Amino acid sequence: MTPPPPPAADATTLEAPILRAGVVRGGLVDRVGGIATVLRFMRFAAVGGLASAVYLCLTFAFMQAGVHYMTAASTAFACAIVTNFSINRTWTFGRGERHVLLQLSAFAAVQLSMAVLNLSMLYMVVETVGFGPVALNQLAVAGVLLPVNFIASRRWGFR
């Protein structure tokens, strides 16, 4: 008597090992893992765009209410990080294995590091090879840093 064949692999049965170990090598798992990673990256980018909109809108709203621009920007940045973390935790990466406060702390550290890297790169680009308005240079820097942010967030923020 032969044993029954193993159940067919689908995206849900393959996602758990993909989340734990990255893309698993070999055949169907590799293809599904690659697709899952691309979809996760697209979700991460969309959530980042939303967090940027939250940051800009709150900064503007606080400034319109008479709050000093540095206080407005700092408060808006903290709100954007919490928004970004909450949505990425539920929609992009999943809950992970660590406690939520530990994840939030790690994610905030990644985002603060990315902000420092972003500002450093923006300064270098504007002062050396600036091409047009600063906002255009910022978009270019953000585009370059997006994959770095994704990898850092996945590895350290949402383990």
Image: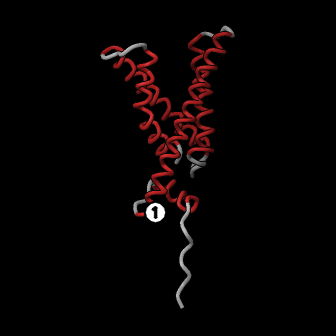
Judged from this view, the residue extending furthest toward the right is 65
Residue 154 higher or lower than 34, as above or below? above
User: Left or right: 29 with respect to 131?
Assistant: right
Judged from this view, the residue extending furthest toward the bottom is 1
Q: Quadrant of residue 113?
A: top left
Task: Locate residue 126, reporting x and y percent.
Answer: 36, 15
Residue 147 higher or lower than 12, as above or below? above
Q: Residue at x 41, y 25 (%)?
A: 140
Task: Locate residue 43, reporting x and y percent.
Answer: 55, 41
Total numbered circles: 1
Task: Locate residue 135, reporting x and y percent.
Answer: 46, 17
User: Left or right: 43 with respect to 23?
Assistant: right
Secondary structure type for disc 1: helix
Q: Residue at x 47, y 55 (%)?
A: 33
Q: Residue type at mark 1?
A: Leu
- Image quarter (top left, top right, bottom left or bottom right) of the N terminus: bottom right
Report crowding for label 1: few under 14, some 14 to 19, many 20 or more residues within 10 A (C-alpha).
some
Q: Which residue is mark 1?
A: 28
Q: Quadrant of residue 151?
A: top left
Judged from this view, the residue extending furthest toward the top is 66
Color scheme of the displayed model: secondary structure
Q: Nearer the viewer, residue 135 or 100?
A: 135
Task: Locate residue 124, reporting x and y percent.
Answer: 34, 19
